[in-house]
Image: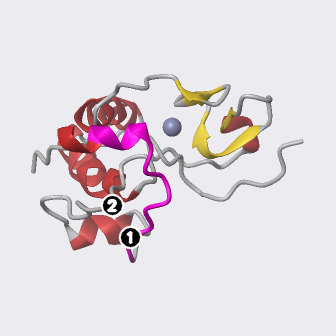
Amino acid sequence: MCVEFSYTHCQSCGMPLEDQSLLGTEIGGECSTDYCLYCYEAGEFKQPHVTFQEMVDMCVSYLQKDGVAAEEARHLLTSFLPSLKRWRKGGMLEPVIIEKEAFQIMGITARTSNADELTAQTKNSNTMVCVL
Ligand SMILES: [Zn+2]
């Protein structure tokens, strides 16, 4: 069934998609190639109105469970998440502060200006806040 996925991280929360069992589902039941099962189900975001800041807060708590210090987790996420499809925005591509080190840590070497998902979800861009 679900044999290919196009990203190595969920394009909403940044979770590594190491296994296809972690993939979300589309309306027809096929696997999402972009998002994890915690973010996306049956073709819709589970939390369609979550803001960037709320997503960071959620992910910080997950990373903390993995033993990452809260401060470090927040630092990474506020740098990494804006590069993901859900949070990437045409027109306002520059998160306020980009820490080069964080990008290297997360394996990100370049950001794209690909504005292929200018949907209603992009309205969340107005709530993007950098807390660094
Ligand atoms: Zn996710």
SS label for mark 2 = loop
The foreground one among 78 and 105 is: 78
Residue 33 belongs to the span the image colors magenta = no
First of labels 1, 2 by sequence position: 2
Identify the residue shown where x is 26% and y is 57%. 79
* Residue labelled with disc 1: 113
The foreground one among 96 and 78 is: 96
Residue 96 lies left or right of residue 61; in this view the side is left
Pointer 1: residues within 10 angstroms few (<14), some, or many (20+)? Answer: few
Is label 1 in contact with label 2 (beta carbons under 8 Å)?
A: yes
The boundaries of the magenta stretch are 110-124
Residue 36 lies left or right of residue 104; in this view the side is right
Identify the residue shown where x is 72% and y is 28%. 27
Check disc 1 and give the amino acid type: Ser
Residue 7 percent across, percent down from the top left: 60, 57
For this orientation, the residue located farthest to the left is 132
Q: Quadrant of residue 28?
A: top right
Identify the residue shown where x is 67% and y is 38%. 23
For this orientation, the residue located farthest to the right is 1
* Residue labelled with disc 2: 90
Residue 121 belongs to the span the image colors magenta = yes
Instruction: Relative to 49, say whether 84 is above or below.
Output: below
Residue 56 percent across, percent down from the top left: 29, 37
Check disc 2 and give the amino acid type: Gly
